[in-house]
Image (cartoon, coloured by chain):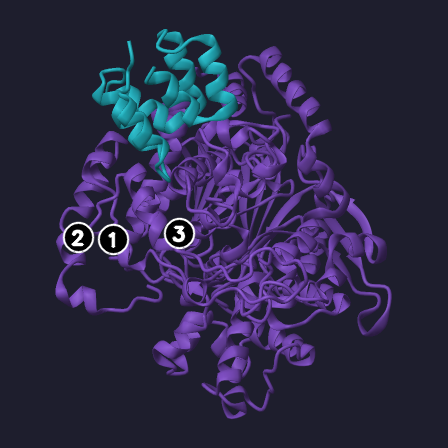
Chain colours: A cyan, B purple
Amino acid sequence: MAVLTKAEAKRLSELDDFYMPLLDSLKKAGVLDDAGHRRYMLTGYYRLVEYLYTKKLISAKDAEAALAEGFTALVASLSS
Amino acid sequence: MYGWCGQRLRVDLSKGTIIKEPLSYEYRRKWIGGRGMNSEVIYREVPPNLDPFDPDARVCFGVGPISGTAAPASGRVTVSCKSPLTGGFGDSNMGGHWGAELKYAGYDQIIVQGRAPKPVYIWIDDDNVEIRDARHLWGKFPREADAMIKQELGDEDIHIVVIGPAGENLVRFASTFNDVYRAAGRTGHGAVIGSKNLKAIAVRGSGTVKIARPKEFFDVCNRLRQKFKTDPMRKFLYEIGSLSLINVANHDGWLSVNNFKQGAHPEAWRMSGEEHSKTVLKHREGCFACPICCGRFTEIKEGKYAGEYGGGPEYEHSVPTGPRVGVFDPNAIWHNMILTNNYGMDGIETGGVIATAMEWYEKGLITSKDTGGLELTWGNQEVVEKLITMIAMREGFGDVLADGASRAADRLGLGDEGHKYTIATRGMTLPGDDPRGLGFAYGVGFAIGTRGGCDHLRCLASLELSGFMYPGLNTKILGDERPVKPTTTVGKGYCCFYEENQKAMVDCLNVCCFTTHWSYAVLTADQVDYFNAVTGMDITEEEFMEIGERIVNLERAYWARLLSGKREDTIPERFQKEPMPKSVDGQTNVGYVFPVEKILPGYYKYRDYDPDTGFPSERRLKMLGLEDVAKDLAPLRAKYNSESEKKKKKYYY
């Protein structure tokens, strides 16, 4: 099941500074709680990708793409 | 106890007392060491309105829990005070070997307060600590005082922190040195030390640093040292030092030339690391446990300055008294560096204040009547070297400049037009890198830096700066490779937030940022690994970075107590309004200005700074365990936005 809508993914991928809005969207979708939101803000993008993979919200292939290509690949995975 | 010594020294020079204070587990865990512990002391013990030269003011010397171990470059020392230059929070750090020696003597920190009735130095020999007569050392250059103390104590292997004549003369940007040539340059703590009639702190330690999990620790260290063997940044820093940046800066247009009126110059190559290595490099030097060894030792061989020698140069020391004042003769630049080191002054502010005065002179705001007959024209080396001495000795026009560019503008009655050319924020002139070319995240550091306008190393957005040498790293940490482009606003808010917290931790561990998040052989996870192995703790990466965030917020709160916030989060007009001119063929940043206001709102969101005041929010302060700080700031939020406050122009405090 998609975590983000296609529209949300498109909006995020067009932002200059996407990271806080992405964390906010994941919180709104119930993927992150307040503590998780804060944890991945402090520790960085790759820790967020690890978490999403651990929670099986993205596949190993998606995680690999997210780390190689960045957040646009991640939001695409999360919206498909 | 592992890692820490668990105690600090408090020396009161008025009373002549020396007290050893224990540092609790909770305190150590909350503030770690170095910059963290020092900032805590400055916030709690130095009221924001206290004169930095008041005997009650403190100056702190802090090291971290891994200082003195085999962790890469773990020998730095943080020196902190209320800055006499900016009037706000101030700190700076230096390499060398003194920090490790302090740990071996059994101390994590020294707090000095009070004022001695006559010049003194402190001698720490393990448990034995003495305050000794230093009248015979007063007026001596660091290299002279260092040698005299070693001879007096009969020990060549002691390590000494010392100030020069500029600190004694209360030059507001006097520096502190150890091992003669390793300087903590910025914010003027050398003058605070001088105001206490303290010349030096000599240390000899015979102890060790206990490591909780030695095998784990050495495995981490060995892994990291292997990474340094192939690290691309290490190669440049070792072979040609930080002057490896000169040709890069000149190509990308971020070299400060003539007070940042230009970003490049056809003659700049002459002072490059490549040329320095071929001509005047005597040998390379490394600080404690350093796998890079970027330090240089220079001996001038030809011309007017032949025979002069000294430690350095560094990029940030050479550019301000070189291209920034229009001087491109390399031997003159090395001479100016040796001279400022001898007097014990911050090379950046020295060059910055002279460059500012040159622009005042050019614009007709001052004349030779103000300068005592000196013709302050660009590139006038004779005047530059004369002014360096006059500033250090507070003679004539030098006495005016010895207060720093912002205060000098007011002493000369130049008004807003004068301040326009100071190229400073919060009272301190900026280092020799132009954000219109070096990078927009880097430039944000000038606006929000917690030690005033210069945050070239303390919130250095290295992912933007050296990220291009580590493909994929920006994507890994920031989720996007685009922030590596200097002249884009994309991703810069988060880049600044992450790197500022990270650098605060670097300064708590007191390792060199050239080994961590400048070169990227050591990443945050590696720092957590060696921290836990040394201390026996098991903190997470999240906790580790939260400590960095706590320190940044505490320092920011110090400025908030001075009613310095959002309105002061800015950068000089030149960077925002004057498009970078073309000065050399192929210059990459021609026509750029720096739109700082586009990045700050995003950065504020990560910090949870109040959008009206720029003060740390009550919510975030409480989350960070700073409830008392939240109480301090509560009545100031409305005051900051009162009509009377809004009308004030604050160039320093």
> From this viewpoint, is residue B539 visible?
no
Q: Which mark is residue B90?
A: none
Q: Identify the element where label 3 is drawn.
A: loop
* Above or below B80: residue B5: above
Q: CA distance from mark 2 to mark 3?
A: 24 Å
Residue at image coords 74%, 53%: B273
Chain letter for mark 2? B
Q: Identify the element where label 2 is drawn.
A: helix
Left or right: residue B640 versus residue B491 is: left
Q: Which mark is residue B58?
A: 3
Residue at image coords 55%, 74%: B354
> From this viewpoint, is residue A56 visible?
yes
Q: Which residue is mark 2?
A: B636
Along the polypeptide, which appears first: circle 2 or circle 1?
Answer: 1
Left or right: residue B268 versus residue A56 is: right
Q: Which mark is residue B561?
A: 1
Marks 2/1 same chain: yes
